[in-house]
Amino acid sequence: MRFTEIETFRALMRGSSTRKAAALLHVTQPAISQSLKRLEAQAGMLLFQRTGGRLVPTPEARALWIEVERVFIGMDAIEHRVRSLRDFGVSQLELSCFPAYGLGFMPRALARLKAHRGASPWPQVSLQVLSSKDVRDRVAMGISDFGLMADELSLEGIDHSTFSRFPGVVVMPEGHALARFKTIKPEQLAEAPFLSLNPEDPSHQRLEAALAPYGVALRVLVQTPYAASVCEMSLRGLGVGLVNPITALDYAERGLVVRRFSIDVSFTCLLALPAGKVLSATARDFISLMRLQLVEDEKRLQRYLR
């Protein structure tokens, strides 16, 4: 039994004549008659009584119609789902992000996504702010669609690319003695209590290596794994620190002073993807919007790096 015969049956049930059925399906009346003949032959029973130019459904036809309608309701749902996937993609985003970008940057990027979608359906979004290790593990297991993480771990089991790489910036409280300088030199870091990232952090190790030729020893007051904590403590007058400028941007708007560092101590953010997995259209669109947000953040940052 072919689908065209089922379509013919449905059109006849709705139209009660070959003329109306032909109009519904945009075919000729003889085509409808031939299709009905094949259907009744395959079914082995009469489905319509021919009465005065009309086709009157038999009880068997009415029983069959119930099942046919269920099939077409399912087909309509499939067509609707296809259109939705074409226009909006999979309506779910599972995101993992390390704290440097998860506390400020990702909320800004999600706000951009909200504005971008307008009246379109909003996807179900989960944003988990985790350590880079946990980000990597969730991406590797396929729990997250993608993640942002630091460059401090083995990347085995995931696909990855560089999302951003920036030279670190020196942060300090408003009115600090170093705030009058546009660029901070290595030896000046030794003049104030230093708020340090943990020793195992790659950016801290790069800082130590960069300072070694200058013979500079930092006066570490506090160690922390999070750049956001460095910024918060600096904002409250505890000392100075060197952080990713994207993290510093959130606090610069609250009064934290941000200055360039004379040597390049880079902070790298990686885009981590499940190995071999094709991203949904929603995920691809959001990554594009994240890149636009990154460009905007860079422009805003320049206002504070005077």
Image (cartoon, helix red, strand yellow):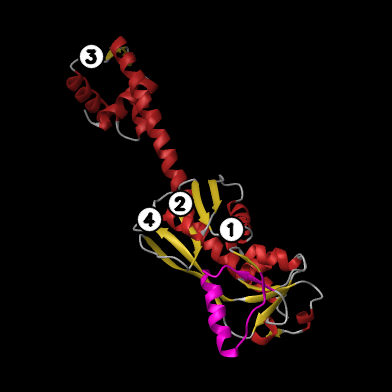
Residue 6: image quadrant is top left
For the N terminus, which image quadrant?
top left
Tell me how far mark 4 sits from mark 3, CA to CA.
51 Å
Q: Which mark is residue 278?
A: 4
Tell me how far mark 2 sits from mark 4, CA to CA.
13 Å
Of the pair 29 and 299, the residue shown nearer to us: 299
Q: Are marks 3 and 2 in contact (CB under 8 Å)?
A: no
Tell me how far mark 3 sits from mark 1, CA to CA.
67 Å
Q: Earlier in the sequence, mark 3 or mark 1?
A: 3
For the C terminus, which image quadrant?
bottom right
How crowded pointer 1 is (Cα within 10 Å; few <14, some 14-19, many 20+) is rated as many
Tell me how far mark 2 sits from mark 1, CA to CA.
14 Å
Residues in magenta, as a range: 194-221
Of the pair 62 and 87, the residue shown nearer to us: 87
**x%, y% of residue 66?**
36, 18
The residue singled out by tag 3 in the image is: 46
Secondary structure state at the residue bearing disc 4 = loop
Residue at the spot x=37%, y=24% of the render?
70
Callout 4 amino acid: Val
Of the pair 36 and 184, the residue shown nearer to us: 184
Callout 1 amino acid: Gly
The residue singled out by tag 1 in the image is: 102
Closer to viewer: mark 2 or mark 4: 2
Tell me how far mark 3 sits from mark 2, CA to CA.
56 Å
Q: Are marks 3 and 1 in contact (CB under 8 Å)?
A: no
Secondary structure state at the residue bearing disc 1 = helix
**x%, y% of residue 240?**
70, 74
The residue singled out by tag 2 in the image is: 144
Secondary structure state at the residue bearing disc 3 = loop
Residue 267 in sight from this viewpoint: no
